[in-house]
Each structure stands twice: as C-alpha cells, then as structure tokens.
Amino acid sequence: MRDVLFAPSLLSADFLDVRSSIASLKGQHDWLHVDVMDGCFVPNITFGPGFVSALRRQYPAEVLDVHLMIEYPDRLLDAFLDAGPDYLTVHLEADRHIHRTLSRIRERGARAGVSINPGTSEELLRPVLPLVDLVLVMSVNPGFGGQSFIPSALEKTRSLCRWREAGHYSFLVEMDGGISRGNAAQIALGGCDVLVMGSAVFGAQDPALFLQEIKLNV
Ligand code: DX5
Ligand code: ZN
C-alpha cells in the first residue's frame, strides 16, 4: 500500500454551507483543495483570496491546497499568499514569468506548485522542477467538477517521477480531475502522491466512509 494523500475539492462542497461539507469528511481527508477560477483562464468563477483567508482563520490546522486557475497569477499572488495557503499552485499556461512567480511563492514561505492542462507537455516543466514543492497534473480540462478522467495524464506522472528521481528533487505529484472509486488505485500505483477528488467525495452518501473505503484500496 502506498502512502497517498487525499485532497477533497471544495468545488463540489455546498457553497452555502461549506462548514458542513468539511465536517462531513470527519477528518478522513489529508488536505483541502481549493479551486480558484477567474472566468477567464477557465470558463467558471469560484473563490477569491477572502475565502481562502476565512478558511485559514476557521481551520488553522488544515492543509490548504490552493489551485489558482487564473490568468496572470502574479497580479493576485500577494493577496493569495496573505490569505495563508500551505500550497499555492499556478498554471504554467497562465503565467509569462513562471520562474519568478514560483520563486516568489517560496520566498513568502508557502509551498510552490505548478500545474499543466491536459494539452500541455510535461517537458515544459523541466526548467522549473528545482523550484517546486508540488506538480499538479490536470486530468480534465479545468473549470468544472464531474468530468471524465483523461488517461494521458498517467504518462505525465511517470515522466515526472523519473525526473524527480534522477534530479533528486522532492516535489509531490498531484492528480486532479475525474478521479473516482474506479480509477483511484491505478492512479496511485502510477506514482501520484496526492489525489484530488471533488464530485466523488462530496457526491457520496457518506463522504467520510467513502474516503475510508478508498484508502483501503490504494
Ligand atoms: C477542475 C478542478 C478540480 C475539480 C475536480 O477544474 O481543478 O479540482 O474540482 O473535480 P472532480 O473530482 O469532480 O473531477
Ligand atoms: Zn483543482
């Protein structure tokens, strides 16, 4: 059994009662994944820095894994860093100066993550691998929960694990999108360290039981 972390995505939580959604996990999760969307990089709008900061205040011990799906993330970087995330992830495709952005996240004391869409080659990540604590591989086109898993993401995970070993890096590999009871074990076996799950967790009758069961399978 691999030591895999589970990060339920609040995108599939009850937006009017996020506290109850988090309570329904009964501590069976490892991280909370927060999907920030700007209506421009992706065709949907969700949370801003104020939401992240409210989560931080309310849940000081939770690991907040903030996934920025926004254009020009450097413009809002300080606002999100001030909000107190543990991991702050930006998209390679959205940032003209990814090297500077990732360095700044670390300078400010957060863990830096970089993400790529399904249509982006993992080769493009190679120059920034020494600068990151997390690589988030998108396994759906970002914007919505409940989409189907795109299998080519598994190839990317394998390349990243190889490069991590060869370069003696220590970043975690996270997979996000379309992960369900049916494919979680295969994704974990493929080398992923963190599995993001939105609709599968919060759509379950009992999210805590679902997580308990899935942990036995990976
Ligand atoms: C998609 C988001 C994901 C999403 C995953 O743009 O980045 O985190 O919540 O949802 P599911 O698990 O339903 O595919
Ligand atoms: Zn996400």
Image (cartoon, rainbow, N blue to C red):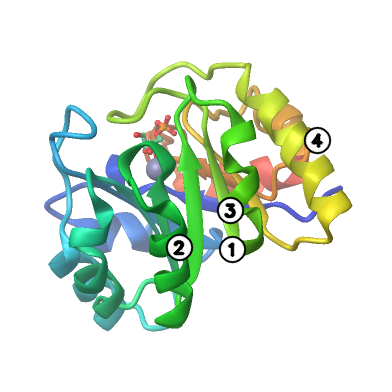
Q: CA distance from mark 1 to mark 3?
A: 5 Å
- Give the side of residue 50 with respect to residue 133, left or right: left
Q: In terms of depth relative to the viewer, which is nearer, 141 or 21? A: 141
Q: Quadrant of residue 217?
A: top right
Looking at marks 4 and 2 on the same chain, the residue that comes earlier in the sequence is marked by: 2
Residue 128 marker: 3
Amino acid tagged 2: Leu
Q: Secondary structure at mark 1?
A: helix
Reading the image, the residue beneath label 4 is: 189
Ligand 2 within 8 Å of disc 3? The answer is no
Looking at marks 3 and 4 on the same chain, the residue that comes earlier in the sequence is marked by: 3
Q: Quadrant of residue 70?
A: top left
Q: CA distance from mark 4 to mark 2?
A: 28 Å
Are the two marked residues, 1 and 3, in contact with CB atoms closer than 8 angstroms? yes
Are the two marked residues, 3 and 2, in contact with CB atoms closer than 8 angstroms? yes
| Residue at the (26%, 54%) spot, across then down | 73
Residue 63 appears in the picture as rendered? no
Q: In terms of depth relative to the viewer, which is nearer, 183 or 24? A: 183
Residue 131 marker: 1
Give residue 23's position: percent from left, percent from top. Answer: 36, 63
- The mark total stands at 4
How packed mark 3 is, by other alpha carbons closer than 10 Å (few <14, some 14-19, many 20 or more), is: some
Give residue 76's position: percent from left, percent from top. Answer: 19, 62
Looking at marks 3 and 2 on the same chain, the residue that comes earlier in the sequence is marked by: 2
Are the two marked residues, 1 and 2, in contact with CB atoms closer than 8 angstroms? yes
Q: CA distance from mark 3 to mark 2?
A: 8 Å
Residue 102 marker: 2
Amino acid tagged 1: Leu
